[in-house]
Image (spheres, rainbow, N blue to C red):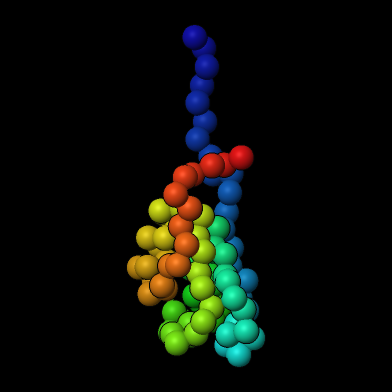
Amino acid sequence: LGAQVVGTPLVRVAYLRDVRLDAAALAACDWVALTSAHAVEAFVAAVGGARALAGSRTRVAVVGAATAGSARRLGLRVDLVPGRADAA
């Protein structure tokens, strides 16, 4: 039909350097909501590892199964995953 497909990346993920979240401030939070695998990676790096939440009352919510999998692989305890995916 005369069309030519051109594949090109449209999104680039760049983590902020030297971003650290204070463990004491984090412990005062009831919930942390993570919206993507990239958010999980950035969060774990910013808190200095999943152990920062060990023994904390802070609960972790994620947006779906893939994000939950990423969080669990990095050692986070996932407390809430929605039962239905909805991008609306």
Tell me: 25 left or right of 74: right
Seen in the picture, residue 33 relative to 18 is either above or below; the reply is above
In-front residue for pair 87/46:
87
Quadrant hosting residue 67: bottom left
The residue at the point 49 percent across, 44 percent down is 85
Tell me where residue 23 appears, x and y as whole percent. 57, 88
Kindly give the residue lying farthest to the bottom in the view shown: 24
In-front residue for pair 74/9:
74
Tell me where residue 70 appears, x and y as whole percent. 40, 62
Seen in the picture, residue 3 relative to 18 is either above or below; the reply is above
* Residue 38 visible in this rendered orientation of the protein: no
* Residue 5 visible in this rendered orientation of the protein: yes
Tell me: 74 left or right of 53: left
The residue at the point 37 percent across, 60 percent down is 69
The residue at the point 43 percent across, 67 percent down is 78
Tell me where residue 55 appears, x and y as whole percent. 45, 87
* Number of numbered labels in the structure image: 0
Tell me where residue 21 appears, x and y as whole percent. 61, 82
Kindly give the residue lying farthest to the top in the view shown: 1
Seen in the picture, residue 52 relative to 42 is either above or below; the reply is below
Seen in the picture, residue 2 relative to 27 is either above or below; the reply is above
In-front residue for pair 50/59:
59
Kindly give the residue lying farthest to the left in the view shown: 73
Quadrant hosting residue 88: top right
The residue at the point 55 percent across, 58 percent down is 35
